[in-house]
Amino acid sequence: MAHRPPLAELGLNTGKKTRLHRILHEHGLRNGTAFFLPYDQGLEHGPRDFFANPAAGDPKYILKLALEGGFNGIAIQIGLAEKFYWDYAGELPLVLKLNGKTEIPSDAEALSPLHGSVEDAVRLGADAVGYTLYVGTPAQEQDFAQLRRVRADAHRFGMPLIVWAYPRGSAIEAKGGRDSFYAVDYAARTASELGADVVKVNFPHPAKIDNVPGGYARETTSQQAIDAVVRSAGRTLLLVSGGGKAGDDAMLEKARESMEAGATGLIFGRNVWQRDHDESLRFVSALREILAKYSSS
């Protein structure tokens, strides 16, 4: 198993260290690993994501599921946090997403505008904030400027910053695509370079090598690829996304390889709540069994 950096090595201020300790050691398995339930898809994809399990369209159902499943936290947008989170305040860590967009415009020049602040997160009792960064978009100057303001406020308020580092834009699609090893590896490094405390990435697909830059157009296993992505994140903790709903065996293997590479944990949404209630908890239990093997300080 690759080395997973402990909190003491991350250069965090007191507030950030306190909140991350609360997330990693007072919730979930309490062993330094993390398992988050994201629920920002209603904005990002629209209600179509709830068709497979209509109950998931109700935020109260999702919050209760996160508590029942023993997650380390839930990631939601400000409107849902203000209207629904108070029922579980203090019981379930909140990651407040500060930006988001609809899927209606083209991703060719993707930008996720701010609609919340770190001050909102403090007011709502959050333990971290989330920011979506589109790596490779032509709008990166505006994206970087937004992130700089969020990073400064997060430091000032002692709030851990989790960056959703997603490759997007026509240039990325022309160089292997958004889930290629090249794109995901670059995204992890970019988030680290720009000051993320934690980075969320999709699992890399090393077979996607069409027109990728030199060094990536070679035969690479999925384990080698995720190993490299974790190294690129360095002292930025890394979470691996579940992505779109897929078969259980594939998802469990993705989780195992991610943790073996030294990832801090997982952030699985649709693969959890696009199932009925009991099936969701069975799947969560299988993922928790994997995380239990990777305790860290």
Image (tube, helix red, strand yellow):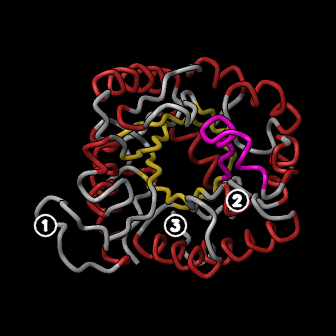
Image quadrant assignment for residue 220: bottom left
Task: Report the span colored magenta.
Answer: 37-51
Q: Residue 28 bears which disc, if any?
A: 2
Q: Residue 296 bears which disc, if any?
A: 3
Residue positioned 33% across, 40% down in the render = 169
In this rendering, the count of numbered labels is: 3
Q: Which residue is mark 1?
A: 215
Q: CA distance from mark 3 to mark 2?
A: 13 Å
Report x, y in % for residue 13: 44, 33
* Vertical comparison of 134 with 61: above or below: above
Tag 1 near tag 3, CB within 8 Å: no
- Mark 1 or mark 3: which comes first in sequence? 1
Q: Residues within 10 Å of mark 2 (few under 14, many from 20)?
A: many
Residue 28 magenta-drawn? no
Query: Does residue 33 appear left or right of residue 112 in this picture?
Result: right
Residue positioned 82% across, 44% down in the render = 57
* Vertical comparison of 92 with 212: above or below: above
Q: CA distance from mark 1 to mark 3?
A: 32 Å
Q: Residue 224 bears which disc, if any?
A: none
Residue positioned 54% across, 72% down in the render = 255
Report x, y in % for residue 48: 72, 46
